[in-house]
Amino acid sequence: MAVDIKSLNHAQLNELINKAQVRQVELRKERVSKLREKVHALLKAEGYTFDDVFGNTRGKSKRAGVPVPPKYRNPADPAQTWSGRGKRPRWFSAALKAGKKEKDMAI
């Protein structure tokens, strides 16, 4: 199917491009689906599940929820600490506004 693109006007050319891009996405989905079927068939033939081979990687990462040691301590209340990650605590922001430096609160 040869298309003479020189004979197409701007609207026709855009339509052809859009159709080609849609078809490209369809072909990719078909290939991925066939590959997924092959992988599942191979796993089934060998007597394994996807999780047996690849682990449960669909959930949180292995590092999620691992506490990070504190990096800063509130000079007014040593029980309050901050790891330096996430939103700054109010005591940290207040201390910076009061003229303290980050290094002054570092542990």
Image (cartoon, grey):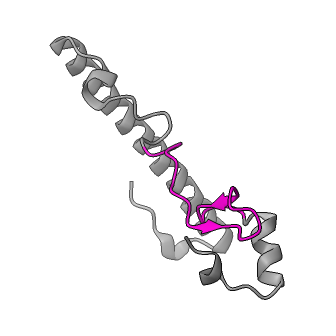
Query: Residue at 64% of width from left, 75% of height from top?
Result: 105
Q: x, y percentage for residue 38?
A: 26, 25
Residue at 45 percent across and 42 percent down: it is 61
| Side (left or right) of 29 relative to 92 | left
Which one is in front, 34 or 23?
Answer: 34
Give the side of residue 67 with respect to residue 86, left or right: left
The image quadrant that residue 52 belongs to is top left
Determine the residue positioned at 39% across, 29% down.
Answer: 56
Q: Give the range drawn in magenta.
A: 63-87
In percent of width and height, residue 36 lies at: 34, 29
Quadrant of the frame with the C terminus: bottom right
Residue drawn at x 72%, y 63% as measured from the top left: 87
Q: Which of 60 and 28 is in front in this view?
A: 60
The answer to whether 101 is drawn above or below residue 26 in the figure is below
Predominant SS along the magenta part:
loop
The percent coordinates of residue 9 (x first, y second) are 63, 73
